[in-house]
Amino acid sequence: MGTQHNGTIKIISEPFDPWAELSSYETSHLTAGQIGATATFVGTMRDFNEGDDVSAMELEHYPGMTDAQLQLIADEAQTQWSLDNALIVHRVGRILPGEPIVLVACWSAHRAAAFDACRHLMEALKSRAPFWKKETLKDQSHRWVEKNTDGYSASQ
């Protein structure tokens, strides 16, 4: 895991159960009674984007670079919010509507830190992590997704 990382980055190419990942991680990396708050986010693939029906998505990444950027994002959150631990699980490869794409989890002594760090990790991941999305539309045509949605402005 590196020198002082209190967290794990996993990039996987197979479908995953975010709740099983979370349970497994808590069992193997956390001590019962030591954590006051857990915040999680699970992002799943939608069957629409930019007004079109989408039947699948290919999510590409650059091994090494993507992992390093995700670890940097996690380390920044660890420092800013004094997290006890963090987990990022991200899919790559072919993804179908309804399948989980990303799991972000943060553990802290207090809920505010867990909530804020979880939100920050997800927004930083969407804007800074090197992933490339190619959608397959219902008519079997393909297109590259040029921009991600801004989660901060969408809620304000």
Image (tube, helix red, strand yellow):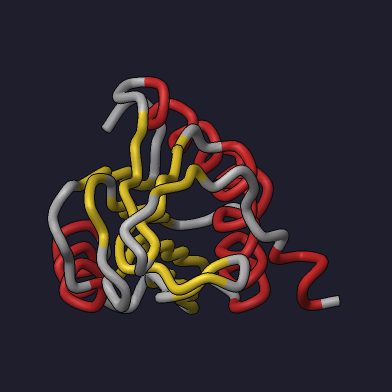
Q: If the image is split into quadrants, where does the C terminus sit? A: bottom right
Q: If the image is split into quadrants, where does the N terminus sit? A: top left
Q: Position of residue 97 (x, y in %)?
A: 31, 73
Counting labels gives 0
Q: Tell which residue pokes out farthest to the top in this image.
A: 64
In this rendering, position of residue 12 left or right of residue 81: left
Give the residue displayed 67% in from the left and 74% down from the top: 112
Q: Is residue 71 shown to the viewer in this render?
A: yes
In this rendering, position of residue 30 left or right of residue 14: right
Q: Is residue 40 shown to the viewer in this render?
A: no
Q: Quadrant of residue 32?
A: bottom left
Give the residue displayed 61% in from the left and 43% down from the top: 146
Q: Position of residue 27 (x, y in %)?
A: 16, 68
Q: Position of residue 125 (x, y in %)?
A: 54, 47
Judge whether 118 appears above or below 36 on screen: above
Q: Quadrant of residue 133?
A: top left
